[in-house]
């Protein structure tokens, strides 16, 4: 993991982030008074609690950065090997990240519902659709992002599962540090190019 400031995470204490969701017992046991988000992430990584680190990062990052992190993980796992519905869902999620307007949020709803939460792409479109939405939601945007990242991590098979989860946590940490930002232009082909991580 890097050692830069997690500039995209507003909370100063790991405990404040943990209060936002149901933290697994083995992860909660690592929380200490005054522990920063980075210190908690490092403790989780040291114990190889990668899934718990994914949950924590998803709830620590703002929705926009969280969805972008999920998009980068999906791109790493699947590349261009997406079904038409998943590609539509991914593009809707990316478009909302680039321009998080109410119109783009609403547009993400249909492709998200096309396959429920069955895929990483649909989960990310759902996260975008729920970000800032009013009324009761079936799932929080953060939980949808965590679900998407975990699904993407399974793509490499059981032998690489833990390593891929670790890589995705490191990528999410980079997003939290402000290292991997989304492109400002609207050229679809450059959606992942500026990260220096996902391009082939």
Image: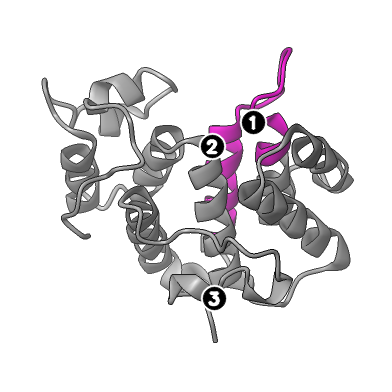
Q: Quadrant of residue 189?
A: bottom right
Does residue 160 show up?
Answer: yes
Does label 1 or label 3 sit earlier along the sequence?
A: 1
Helix, strand or loop for disc 1: loop
The picture places residue 46, in percent across and down from the top left corner, at: 17, 52
Residue situated in front as seen by the camera: 25 or 2: 2
Furthest-top residue in view? 135
Q: Quadrant of the C terminus?
A: bottom right
Residue on which disc 3 sits: 193
Q: CA distance from mark 2 to mark 3?
A: 21 Å
Judged by its main secondary structure, the magenta piece is helix
Residue on which disc 1 sits: 131
Q: Nearer the observer, disc 1 or disc 3?
A: 3
Residues packed near mark 1 inside 10 Å, few (<14), some (14 to 19) or many (20 plus): many
Q: Is residue 178 left or right of residue 195?
A: left
Residues packed near mark 2 inside 10 Å, few (<14), some (14 to 19) or many (20 plus): many
Residue situated in front as seen by the camera: 93 or 141: 93
Q: Where 171 falls versus 46 (above or below)?
A: below
Q: Is residue 139 magenta?
A: yes
Q: Is residue 126 left or right of residue 115?
A: left
- Please provide the residue range marked out in magenta: 127-152
The picture places residue 128, in percent across and down from the top left corner, at: 68, 40
Q: Quadrant of the N terminus?
A: bottom left
Q: Residue at x 36, y 29 (%)?
A: 24
Circle number at residue 109: none
Helix, strand or loop for disc 3: helix
Q: Residue at x 70, y 77 (%)?
A: 80
The reply to whether the C-beta atoms of the residues labelled 1 and 2 are less than 8 Å apart is: yes
Q: Residue at x 30, y 20 (%)?
A: 16
Q: Where 67 falls versus 55 (above or below)?
A: below
Residue on which disc 2 sits: 63
């Amino acid at each position: 993991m890097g050692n830069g400031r997690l500039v995209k995470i507003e909370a100063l204490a790991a405990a404040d982030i943990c209060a936002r969701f149901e933290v697994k017992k083995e992860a909660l046991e690592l929380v200490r008074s005054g522990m920063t988000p980075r210190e908690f992430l490092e403790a989780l990584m040291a114990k190889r609690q990668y899934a718990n680190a994914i949950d924590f990062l998803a709830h620590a990052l703002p929705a926009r950065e969280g969805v972008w992190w999920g998009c980068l993980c999906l791109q790493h796992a699947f590349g261009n090997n997406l079904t038409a519905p998943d590609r539509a869902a991914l593009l809707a999620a990316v478009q909302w990240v680039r321009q998080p307007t109410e119109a783009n949020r609403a547009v993400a709803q249909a492709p998200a519902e096309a396959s429920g939460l069955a895929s990483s792409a649909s989960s990310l479109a759902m996260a975008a659709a729920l970000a800032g939405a009013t009324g009761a939601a079936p799932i929080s945007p953060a939980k949808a992002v965590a679900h998407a990242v975990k699904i993407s991590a399974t793509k490499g098979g059981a032998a690489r599962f833990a390593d891929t989860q670790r890589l995705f946590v490191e990528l999410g940490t980079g997003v939290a540090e402000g290292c991997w930002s989304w492109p400002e232009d609207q050229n679809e082909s450059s959606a992942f190019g500026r990260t220096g991580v996902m391009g082939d």
